[in-house]
Image (cartoon, coloured by chain):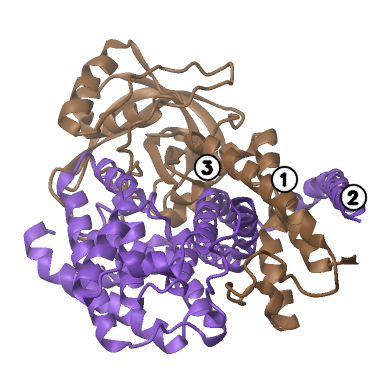
């Protein structure tokens, strides 16, 4: 019997991929990477990797010293598989495959922060746009830009928070986010509360609703938690209290937030998590009306264990 | 001897698992000290990179499993029997099958490679490759939802996509005679030894192919994911905005973005929707149609399998056809 190093390497890599996915699930970091709804799918992937690992094992020890043609297709396979490439190319291929394993294990996933928010840019809330804006957003000279969510039309149950300090508003499963049908009734619901409590479970739907028709909420008190983000051109007393919305995986993250005003805003650093309470008022942005919070009290808080919100 | 061998195999398994556990315990302390030393933007990049990979892994696994299945269980004879002789019918049929087949671009190239290896003509395989990731129940639904229960855009995406696929496949059928696979990729492709083999043996062979396929194709997923993460981390969308104004240039920008970002077709509807107030409907539609058909990840995979000249012509054809169709229908969509 002879030992086939390459096959052993492949087996190990398969095991490592399985391990990587499992590690993310065990540490809970999976929440920092993909939408919780897809957890099951990735667990299945981990299981498949394990299975493939087991299937790969026998190939490590071959009967005679020849390359692995004893897989039962003899000459019915094509030979572009890694086995047949020149050594240099082979090494590069393995390095590429191993790369995510290395970074995945060595470097912890990070919660997305304000610098990403800045790159993603600030889009007007689609529910808020009464007429189609075809011109691109003004850039830095625009000091009233309102960062909000843009792609929230999906039905799913809001994620249950296991964090004890945040209760979840159990919303009915949203079948659609057609502004007329969904957001308008929400207005009534939200107005019923003496103080609007923004929580992870309702952030998206409440945020959408308030941005859709801010005038209905003018004068209402609101409490929310988010990280600080400052757009270029904002005044000293302005910042945005934001959250990232994850649809599928963090690559598709978008921002939802509220423009907020209070005296000490310039002293609060970006990425700080704060909890704030204030009164909603409305301002004009071109032909649109957008909400703004005049903060009455605020405090710095720790980053919640579940920083992202889901549609 | 057999007994010894199986013992050794199991033993190796245990050893490897041992390595793995040792590795795990070793890696944690490094974890802590590293995260301080690495620049913030790289941490962000890594997170986005990881998320794309973890997200895509299940789909690529499905793709390579299916590819393995095709390799072992579908024969040339099967294909000969089902494939219509007439080019146009064949193209139409393959586009329809692609529409029903839920595939992600991550998984489609291995499948296409196998199909061609089994005798499916190039143009039909291309038709399948273009419609597979673009038109399937999951994508239709996610498009519908991402734009706020917007039936029009979901239908426009599928309709334009289907017609474009037909046109592209037709063009390919006229331009290319043989199957354009890289020579060594085609060598020794399918003998008929697999018929008559016992099922378990075939299954075993299938799994081995799956594993090898994963190693072949996985690296392109990784490269593509890295590039997409890079763009997300370092390129500001303001830059992009400045590039695109007006029908033609905004469409081109969106198509370029679709190409570079290499998103999975299940999710790209949401990304596309996020551009809704910045780019016109027409240009977003081009993003939605172009992305699933061809992108950076795909192109790399294709280059591994097909002749360079073919890939270049294919990508150009797809670009031109999609672009023209979008421009032509822009009046209807009102974008």
Q: Nearer the viewer, residue B103 or B9?
A: B9
Looking at the image, residue A146 sits to the left or right of residue B331; the answer is right
- Please tell me in which quadrant of the rendered image residue A204 appears: top left
Crowd band around label 1 with a 10 angstrom C-alpha radius: few (<14), some (14–19), many (20+)? many
Q: Which of B135 and A152 is in front in this view?
A: B135
Q: Mark 1 points at which residue?
A: A19
Q: Which residue is drawn at 64% across and 73% down?
A: A81
Q: Residue at x 62, y 55 (%)?
A: B207
Q: Which chain is purple?
A: B
Residue at disc 3, secondary structure: loop
Q: Which mark is residue A190?
A: none
Q: Name the residue under label 2.
A: B3
How far, Cα to Cα, is label 2 from label 1? 29 Å
Q: Which of B88 and A280 is in front in this view?
A: B88
Q: Where is residue A232 drawn, in percent x and y?
A: 41, 54
Residue at disc 1, secondary structure: helix
- Write down the chain letter for disc 3: A
């Amino acid at each position: 019997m002879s030992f086939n190093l390459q096959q052993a390497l492949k087996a190990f890599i398969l095991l490592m991929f399985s391990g990587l996915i499992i590690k993310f699930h065990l540490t809970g970091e999976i929440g920092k990477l993909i939408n919780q709804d897809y957890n099951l799918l990735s667990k299945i992937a981990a299981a498949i990797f394990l299975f493939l690992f087991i299937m790969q094992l026998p190939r490590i020890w071959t009967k005679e010293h020849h390359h692995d043609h004893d897989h039962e297709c003899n000459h019915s396979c094509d030979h572009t598989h890694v086995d047949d490439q020149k050594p240099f190319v082979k090494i590069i291929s393995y390095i590429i495959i191993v790369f995510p394993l290395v970074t995945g294990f060595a470097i912890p996933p990070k919660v997305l922060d304000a610098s990403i928010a800045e790159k993603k840019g600030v889009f007007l809330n689609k529910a808020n746009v009464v007429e189609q804006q075809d011109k691109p957003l003004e850039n830095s000279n625009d000091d009233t830009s309102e960062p909000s969510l843009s792609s929230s039309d999906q039905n799913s149950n809001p994620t249950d928070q296991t964090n004890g300090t945040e209760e979840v508003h159990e919303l009915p499963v949203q079948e659609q986010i057609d502004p007329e049908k969904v957001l308008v009734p929400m207005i009534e619901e939200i107005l019923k509360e003496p103080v609007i409590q923004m929580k992870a479970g309702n952030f998206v739907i409440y945020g959408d609703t308030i941005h859709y028709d801010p005038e209905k909420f003018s004068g209402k008190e609101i409490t929310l938690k988010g990280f600080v983000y400052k757009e270029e051109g904002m005044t000293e007393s302005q910042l945005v209290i934001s959250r990232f919305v994850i649809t599928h995986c963090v690559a598709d993250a978008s921002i939802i937030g509220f423009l907020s005003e209070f005296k000490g805003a310039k002293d609060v650093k970006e990425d700080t998590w704060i909890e704030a309470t204030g009164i909603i008022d409305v301002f004009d942005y071109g032909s649109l009306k957008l909400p703004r919070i005049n903060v009455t009290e605020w405090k710095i808080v720790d980053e919640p264990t579940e920083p992202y919100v889901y549609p | 001897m057999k007994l010894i061998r199986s013992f050794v195999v199991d033993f190796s398994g245990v050893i490897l698992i041992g390595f793995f556990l040792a590795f795990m315990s070793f890696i944690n302390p490094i974890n802590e000290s590293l995260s301080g030393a690495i620049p913030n933007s790289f941490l962000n990049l890594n997170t986005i990179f990881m998320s794309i990979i973890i997200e895509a892994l299940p789909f690529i696994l499905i793709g390579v499993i299916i590819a393995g299945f095709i390799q072992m269980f579908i024969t040339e004879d099967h294909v000969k029997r089902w494939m219509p002789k007439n080019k146009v019918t064949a193209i139409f049929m393959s586009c329809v099958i692609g529409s029903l087949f839920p595939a992600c671009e991550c998984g489609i190239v291995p499948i296409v490679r196998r199909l061609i290896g089994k005798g499916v003509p190039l143009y039909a395989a291309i038709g399948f490759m273009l419609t597979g990731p673009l038109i399937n129940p999951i994508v239709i639904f996610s498009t519908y939802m991402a734009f706020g229960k917007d039936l029009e855009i979901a239908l426009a995406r599928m309709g334009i996509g289907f017609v474009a696929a037909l046109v592209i496949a037709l063009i390919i059928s006229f331009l290319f005679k043989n199957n354009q696979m890289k020579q060594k990729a085609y060598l020794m492709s399918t003998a008929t030894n697999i018929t008559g083999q016992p099922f378990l043996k075939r299954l075993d062979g299938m799994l081995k192919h799956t594993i090898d396929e994963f190693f072949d194709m996985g690296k392109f997923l990784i490269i593509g994911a890295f590039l997409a993460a890079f763009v997300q981390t370092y390129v500001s969308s303001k830059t992009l905005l400045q590039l695109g104004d007006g029908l033609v240039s905004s469409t081109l920008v969106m198509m370029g973005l679709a190409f570079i970002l290499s998103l999975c077709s299940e999710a790209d509807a949401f990304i596309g929707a996020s551009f809704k107030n910045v780019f016109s409907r027409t240009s977003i539609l081009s993003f939605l149609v172009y992305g699933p058909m061809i992108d950076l990840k795909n192109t790399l995979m294709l280059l591994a399998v097909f002749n360079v000249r073919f890939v270049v012509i294919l990508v150009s054809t797809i670009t031109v056809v999609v672009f023209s169709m979008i421009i032509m229908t822009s009046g209807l969509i009102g974008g």
